[in-house]
Image (cartoon, rainbow, N blue to C red):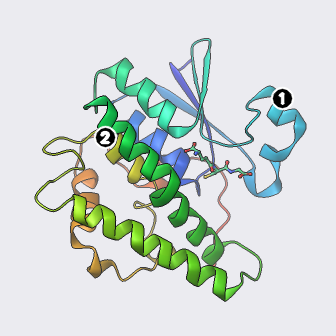
């Protein structure tokens, strides 16, 4: 039996955050696919058995079951002694990520790729929010290879969540964010790295854009 067990599905950048951290740390892990698109995580049975929040990622580690990618990343950083940083600063960027960077990007990508008949005004709203969040990160990376300086921390890992899906799935004008794209490339060059669809197992539901 593997040391870590991840409940996940391949289209989920939240799950990719956890999988990427496990891969970069060389962890012994296995995965269990959840049938998100057919509502598995919304059933009372799944919420009672796995997580009341009805969300993945969920990470099993021994007797512990952890949810929320920020908590999972914090746990793994402590366990492996990797990707740490000044606690308040790490938390500051994890919260920004969960509120704005990941959540708007994930929602916009979902609307473009998988939602039924998304309202163009709603899509445009989310795109503008994504661009604003990217501009914040672009500014923070001015003169820094990673969010907090010379070394990557778990807030960097967290924000990579949706960046390692095909660019066609999040069709920003990527050239407008050269530091974000270079930051993404720095992760792609790390030992253990694999892009999202290579790392996360399970049946895929192709979206409209890939
Ligand atoms: N803040 C959470 C967000 C997790 C999340 O939204 N997961 C999505 C998949 S990417 C999910 O399971 N959504 C289920 C739902 O909203 O019904 C985290 O970072 O773990």
Report the residue marked by disc 1: 48
Residue farthest to the top, as pictured? 63
How crowded is the residue under tag 2: few (<14 C-alpha within 10 Å), some, or many (20+)?
A: some
Left or right: residue 148 versus residue 209 is: left
Residue at the spot x=21%, y=44% of the render?
Answer: 148
Left or right: residue 48 versus residue 120 is: right
Left or right: residue 167 versus residue 117 is: left
The image quarter in which residue 5 lies: top right
Q: Is mark 1 within 8 Å of ligand 1?
A: no
Residue 200 visible somewhere in the drawing: no
Residue at the spot x=46%, y=63% of the render?
Answer: 165
How crowded is the residue under tag 1: few (<14 C-alpha within 10 Å), some, or many (20+)?
A: few
Disc 1 element: helix
Which one is closest to the eye, mark 2 or mark 1? 1
Q: Position of residue 197 (x, y in %)?
A: 50, 56
Residue at the spot x=72%, y=81% of the render?
Answer: 118
Disc 2 element: loop
Residue at the spot x=53%, y=65% of the render?
Answer: 104
Q: Nearer the viewer, residue 73 or 187?
A: 73
Q: Position of residue 72 (x, y in %)?
A: 50, 31
Q: Position of residue 35 (x, y in %)?
A: 75, 49
For marks 2 and 1, give the CA distance: 34 Å
Q: Quadrant of the N terminus?
A: top right
Report the residue marked by disc 2: 192
């Amino acid at each position: 039996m593997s040391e870590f067990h991840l409940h996940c599905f391949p289209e989920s950048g939240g799950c990719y955050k956890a999988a990427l951290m496990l891969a970069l740390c060389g962890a012994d892990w296995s995965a269990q696919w959840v049938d998100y698109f057919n509502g598995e995580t919304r059933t009372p049975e799944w919420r009672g058995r796995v997580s009341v929040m009805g969300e993945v990622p969920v990470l099993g580690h021994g007797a512990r079951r952890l949810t929320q990618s920020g908590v999972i990343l914090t746990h793994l950083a402590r366990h492996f002694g990797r990707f740490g940083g000044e606690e308040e600063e790490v938390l500051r960027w994890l919260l920004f990520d969960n509120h704005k960077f990941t959540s708007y990007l994930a929602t916009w990508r979902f609307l473009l790729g998988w939602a039924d008949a998304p309202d163009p005004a709603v899509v445009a709203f989310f795109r503008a929010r994504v661009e604003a969040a990217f501009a914040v990160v672009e500014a923070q990376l001015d003169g820094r290879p990673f969010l907090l300086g010379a070394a990557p921390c778990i807030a960097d890992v967290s924000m990579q969540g949706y960046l390692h899906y095909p660019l066609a799935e999040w069709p920003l004008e990527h050239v407008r964010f050269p530091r974000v794209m270079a930051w993404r490339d720095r992760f792609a060059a790390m030992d253990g790295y694999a892009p999202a669809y290579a790392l996360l197992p399970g049946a895929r539901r192709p979206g409209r854009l890939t």
